[in-house]
Image (tube, grey):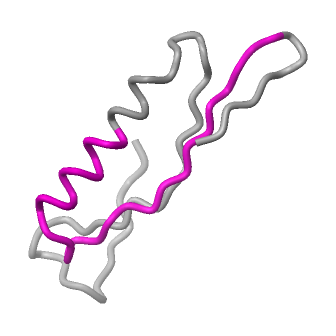
Amino acid sequence: MLTVMSKNNQHATIISVYALTLNAANDVKEQFYSDLGNALTNIPKEDKIILLGDFNTRLGSLFPVGSEKLLPLF
């Protein structure tokens, strides 16, 4: 996590993460997302948040490894 300050005294916090894959144990994944949530909630409300990362996941058993699908943008 890195916090930077701009010329006009505004802050931005940058967090870069590499999420666990589907093969990781559930308790390990839950701890990862809990830690990420705690990090995000501890950033001051007036800061801008830039969250970067590789949220490396697949959707259910319909998409086995090797048959990645592109999802529509929201």
Identify the residue at image location x=43%, y=23%.
Answer: 42
Q: Is residue 2 above or below residue 53?
A: above
Q: How far from the left and from the top, in percent, is residue 70?
A: 38, 67
**Magenta-span inclusion, residue 26:** yes
Identify the residue at image location x=60%, y=18%.
Answer: 47
Q: Is residue 65 left or right of residue 61?
A: right
Identify the residue at image location x=68%, y=32%.
Answer: 3
Q: How far from the left and from the top, in percent, is residue 26?
A: 11, 62
What is the span of residues highlighted in magenta in the rendered image?
Answer: 9-36
Q: Is residue 56 above or below residue 31?
A: below
Name the quadrant containing residue 55: bottom left
Q: Is residue 32 left or right of residue 12?
A: left
Q: Is residue 55 above or below residue 65?
A: above
**Magenta-span inclusion, residue 33:** yes
Identify the residue at image location x=19%, y=65%.
Answer: 59
Name the quadrant containing residue 56: bottom left
Q: How far from the left and from the top, in percent, is residue 37?
A: 33, 35
Q: Is residue 66 left or right of residue 73?
A: left
